[in-house]
Amino acid sequence: MLSTPLGLLGEISDAAARQGIFKHATPTLWRCREQGQNAFDLNSRELGSPPAEFGAANRMTGKGQSAFYGSTSLQCAVDEVARSADIAFSACSFAPSRPLFHFDAFAVPDPPSPFAEDACDDTQALAFLRRFAETLSEPNTDDDQYHYVPTQLFTEYLLAGPEELRPDAVRFASSLDSQYENWVVFVDNSRCLDAPTTRAGPVRDHVAVTAETASGSP
């Protein structure tokens, strides 16, 4: 019997688990914003995930969806946003309140040849996951609004899939430099907090601003 599309995505997700692509980590993540003409405070509301109504289509989220995109490198966070030397920026670092169960695009192995002696049952799934990881790190142009639709759809499946394989985040390489480590954490603006905080709600579901901030020009 042929698998349904959802069945195929489930098989791919299971293969990712078998291959050790799901991991736990507690990264410190920088997020940057152009200063523009209107001043804003360096706090979680202003530098955290955008409110849903301002959420633009991105690598793993569609228009109107809120998520936290950040980098472990301040320089990368700045370069991703302030693309020219005359643009002023402000940045904050954030830390998750617990280790993030995440899909690690850096950990996707190259699929073996189907004719190789060590070829495994996951060969086709690994080919899909390798292409998924590569697409996450490809630059996009404003005139190609559908470039990330495939990665958005697979991410949507992961977030709606079996709870034991439902990631808090995805770790992937920057489109500017593959050595840079970028993350998307699936928290909206209400779950980005200033630390220390007494805001009500489950602590395990938040990212919080740390003491580190930065302002300047690239």
Image (cartoon, helix red, strand yellow):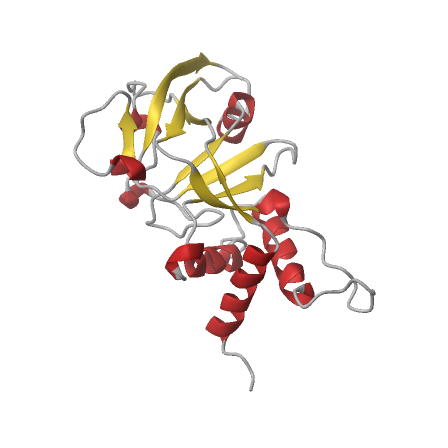
Whether residue 159 appears in this view of the structure is no
Q: Quadrant of residue 175?
A: top right
Can you give x and y, in whole percent of width and height, for residue 63 in the image?
37, 51
Which of the image's four quarters has the C terminus? Answer: top right
Relative to 147, residue 192 above or below: above
Of residue 22 and residue 8, the one placed in the foreground of this image is 22
* Residue visible at 43% across and 61% down in the picture: 157
Whether residue 28 appears in this view of the structure is yes
Can you give x and y, in whole percent of width and height, for residue 201 in the image?
19, 37
Which of the image's four quarters has the N terminus? Answer: bottom right
Relative to 48, residue 148 above or below: below
Relative to 13, residue 39 above or below: above
* Residue visible at 54% across and 56% down in the picture: 17
Of residue 27 and residue 72, the one placed in the foreground of this image is 27
Q: Residue furthest bottom?
A: 1
Q: Quadrant of residue 55?
A: top left
Can you give x and y, in whole percent of width and height, for residue 56 in the image?
39, 45
* Position of residue 194 in the picture relative to residue 62 (left or right): left
* Residue visible at 48% across and 45% down in the picture: 102
Of residue 186 and residue 196, the one placed in the foreground of this image is 196
Can you give x and y, in whole percent of width and height, for residue 106 in the image?
62, 43
* Position of residue 22 in the picture relative to residue 162 (left or right): right
Question: Disc count in the image?
Answer: 0
Relative to 192, residue 6 above or below: below
Of residue 36 and residue 80, the one placed in the foreground of this image is 80
* Residue visible at 54% across and 54% down in the picture: 147
